[in-house]
Amino acid sequence: MRKYFIAGNWKMNHSISETIEYCRQLRVKGLKNISSDIVLFPPSISIQSMMKTLEDTPVKIGGQNMHQESDGAFTGEISSEMFADSGCEYILIGHSERRQYFNETNELVNKKLKKALGSNLKPVVCIGEKLEEREAGKTSDVILEQLKNGLKDIAKADMQNIIIAYEPIWAIGTGLTAKPEQAQEIHSLIRNVIKNDFSEHLGKNLRILYGGSAKVKNAKSLLSEKDIDGLLIGGASLKVDAFYKIIQIAENLTIN
Ligand code: PEP
């Protein structure tokens, strides 16, 4: 049975001391009986402190970006092996900010994805259309292209460890959220692609997160959609109260 998946992408926010304080507060709020999957993606420098502060809680930790090589002269980069060794279970791949500011292509996403899987990390692969693509009626084409090239040559056995996050770029950090039915339409498309290209079972069990100005106010309506299995939350995950409230909303809903 699928469980909700609530993830916080902190991007380049929160120092180590702020991270420790946030995690202490999250612990105090109560994490023991949480049944949803909760994952935080802090800046890499804070991973160890977060891990220590959240020890013995169900919260899992992931990296925000990884290099496609194992090691070498790539100043400033971190490999999938290093994230796995640090205790991370998840890794974000292909976030739109990486695509936009660091020129990451679907081909690079595919390379990173294979590398992450080889290191036993669970990748959260981000896809989504730009505003002009939506307005030109090209949303489905963009999503199909991102899936086709991003998931190229991925083995069926690996597909069960991949999570897809649908994040319309025009909704990220803008305060604009996709209407639940707009998000549902694309989530359903994604699920059908995985059913057709991999298997009915893998498509049915695939976890598809929505991201793009998800917050306390809209979490319930988004999570109530049939094919929305969780949320990837940027801004609203930076405040422990808001993040915890969204966790509680997921805990009080039954997944379809
Ligand atoms: C994100 O960074 O993945 C994101 C969805 O950000 P926000 O929630 O701030 O739109």
Image: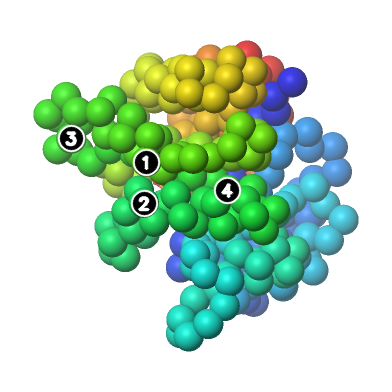
x, y percent for residue 162:
59, 40
- The reply, left or right, for residue 107 in relation to residue 255 is left
- Marks 1/2: CA–CA distance: 6 Å
Q: Which residue is mark 3?
A: 133
Pair 1/3: label in front: 1
- Marks 1/3: CA–CA distance: 18 Å
Which is nearer the N-term, disc 1 or disc 2?
2
Which is nearer the N-term, disc 2 or disc 3?
2
Circle 2 residues within 10 Å: few <14, some 14–19, many ≥20: some
Pair 2/3: label in front: 2
Q: Are marks 2 and 3 in contact (CB under 8 Å)?
A: no
Amino acid type, residue under disc 2 in the picture: Glu
The residue depicted at 59 percent of the width and 55 percent of the height is 116
Number of the label disc, if any, that sits on residue 149: 1
Which is nearer the N-term, disc 1 or disc 4?
4
Q: Quick one: SS at disc 4?
A: strand
Q: Quadrant of residue 133?
A: top left
Ligand 1 near label 1 (Cβ, under 8 Å)? no
Number of the label disc, if any, that sits on residue 123: 4
Number of the label disc, if any, that sits on residue 107: 2
Amino acid type, residue under disc 1 in the picture: Asn
